[in-house]
Image (cartoon, grey):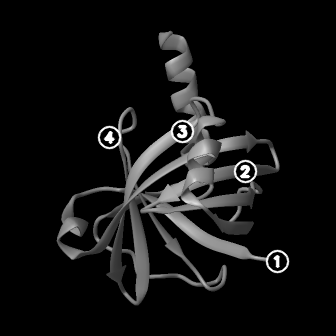
Amino acid sequence: MALEIERRFRVSSDAWRTSVARSTRITQGYLAITESSVIRVRIRDTQGYVTIKSRDGGLAREEFEYAIPLPDAKSLLRLCGQRILEKTRHEVHYGGFCWEIDEYLAPLEDLIIAEVELQSESDDPPRPPWVGEEITHDGSFSNAALAQRIETRKSAAQ
């Protein structure tokens, strides 16, 4: 079983931008969103992925991710309807941890979230000065919830 342990935070300033080690464009959509799990398709650079995640809301969640051919990922994204979001992921190293800063594109362009993956739930990484409110336990900031928000906005606009 694969386990993802992470904490998530709102970003409170642009001070992280001077420390970016790498940036990647990500497009991801949701094939299924239930109370207990999500099935996501993602294109990162020129590689496709399918991911299945549990949604228990804690620090640790089951996560199974599989690389798939890019044409398959593009086809699967079309099945996601309007539950698709785009973001640029920036990697910043701070205090011995790799922080991933997701800078969302329209219509979520005002949202920037930082997450840090941990080895255990007891890890307590030093918080960079540009990290604000912790949102780990706030499900409204999950990527699945954000994709549903986009879907709702687009449906209302039609």
Q: Are marks 4 and 2 in contact (CB under 8 Å)?
A: no
| CA distance separating discs 1 and 2 | 16 Å
The local secondary structure at tag 1 comes to loop
Q: Amino acid at mark 1?
A: Met
| CA distance separating discs 4 and 3 | 17 Å
Q: Residue 91: percent from the left, percent from the top?
A: 36, 72
The local secondary structure at tag 2 comes to strand
Residue 62 vs 133, above or below: the answer is below
Q: Residue 88: percent from the left, percent from the top?
A: 36, 56
Q: Which residue is mark 3?
A: 84
| CA distance separating discs 1 and 3 | 27 Å
Task: Give the quadrant of residue 126.
Answer: bottom left
Residue at 31% from the left image edge and 73% from the top image edge? 22
Farthest residue toward the top? 158
Q: Residue 30: percent from the left, percent from the top?
A: 65, 43
The local secondary structure at tag 3 comes to strand
* Comes first in the chain, label 2 or label 3: 2
Q: Residue 104: percent from the left, percent from the top?
A: 38, 47
Residue at 29% from the left image edge and 65% from the top image edge? 130
Residue at 33% from the left image edge and 75% from the top image edge? 92
Q: Which residue is mark 4?
A: 110
Q: Amino acid at mark 4?
A: Asp
Q: Which residue is mark 1?
A: 1
Within 10 Å of disc 4 (Cα), the crowding (few <14, some 14-19, many 20+) is few
The local secondary structure at tag 4 comes to loop
Q: Which residue is mark 2?
A: 39
Residue at 43% from the left image edge and 45% from the top image edge? 86
* Comes first in the chain, label 1 or label 2: 1
**4 vs 2, front mark:** 2
| Horizontal relation, residue 130 to residue 37: left or right | left
Task: Give the quadrant of residue 93.
Answer: bottom left
